[in-house]
Amino acid sequence: MDHSITGLRTERSDLTDVLTELAADLAARERRLGDGLPTGTVLGIADCIEEVRSGWESGMRSMRSYPTIAAFEHLLGIQVREDVRTLLVALDAKVIALDDIIDTEDPTRAEKVRSSVVVAFSTPLELGAVPPEHREEILEIQYEYWVVLSQLPLLEREMMDRMRGTDARDDLLDAAGSIYAYRSRDIDAFVEIVATTHEVDGALADPLLSDLRAFRARYLLYEDFRHIERDLAEGHQNPIIALMYAFGDPDEVTSTVEALYDRFDYTAAGRDRYGDLLGELERRPDDLGRLVRERMCVLSGGSS
């Protein structure tokens, strides 16, 4: 399913094609290597890259690169330069792979290999795309970015413990809000890299960062609904599951999710300039109440 917005200079397919080309290159290299191996068999590293690409195209994997590029292009009326687009795609793939490593409780060997391959081959793709004139600035952006993201597992664990320990609506909202606010910062480096490489003034870049964090929080909020089965199968909880357990009543859960959503709002200028664009990319359900009831049925083991 294509979640691109038509009429923009850079389409989602322009970004996923970066991984298609990388996978094709790796497949050719692996074939040449396989001819000289005693076994004649190879790992299939291109398939690991293709899995990320197909996840983006289907909407099962979220992208940080595409909303960032789309918002900048919509705001500035330019096309983000090709090397920067490649850099953001490579960083996006790496974040996904590292997120999988952290989130998977007991990964199989195949899962560990798949994530490791994506990290290994997205790294040179990323390094090769860094504009030399901005190398030091981008290095600093990335150091700060990875320091921020490295704190996320601990923060999530502590906030989820708070959610499990209360049934007070305000306390649940505050804890869930803290999780989504911090998770939304996984888009920061993408925004900062585009702003730096395109010399975007802080008067434009800072509100856009705020708006893309709000977008990301809203997107992740609804993404957690889509991940309920997966999280339950892996023995995880997310804030949506915790709210369902805390209340048990679909109407109460729905109103709480709406209140949580409203905590993350766009600036007035952002609503005017690109609010429709980001709103479409949020993938907000048409009927939240119905979605809550369906997901709560899954949680209880029933059928919808």
Image (cartoon, helix red, strand yellow):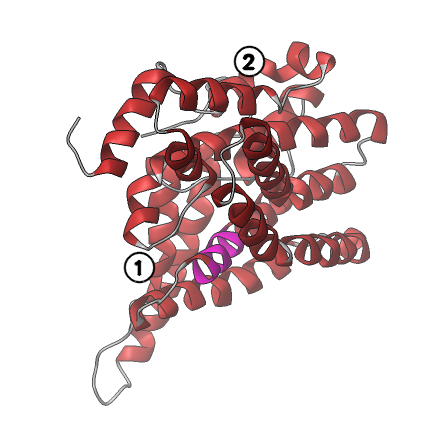
Residue 124 or residue 243, whichever sits in front: 243
Which of the 4 image quarters holds residue 35? Answer: bottom left
Residue 240 or residue 76, whichever sits in front: 240
Q: Is residue 94 magenta?
A: yes
Residue 223, compared with residue 121, is above or below; it is: above
Secondary structure found at label 2: helix
Q: From the viewer's perspective, is the residue at label 2 or at label 1 nearer?
A: 2
Residue 242 in the image: x percent, y percent?
43, 39
Q: Amino acid at mark 1?
A: Asp
Q: Is residue 95 left or right of residue 237?
A: right
The disc at residue 253 is none
What residue would you read off at disc 1?
47
Q: Name the dominant secondary structure of the magenta segment.
A: helix
Q: Residue at x 26, y 26 (%)?
A: 294
The disc at residue 276 is 2
- Magenta stretch: give its range: 93-102
Q: Amino acid at mark 2?
A: Asp
Q: Residue at x 32, y 23 (%)?
A: 291
Residue 47 in the image: x percent, y percent?
31, 59
Residue 77 in the image: x percent, y percent?
67, 20
Q: Residue at x 60, y 52 (%)?
A: 152
Q: Is residue 176 magenta?
A: no
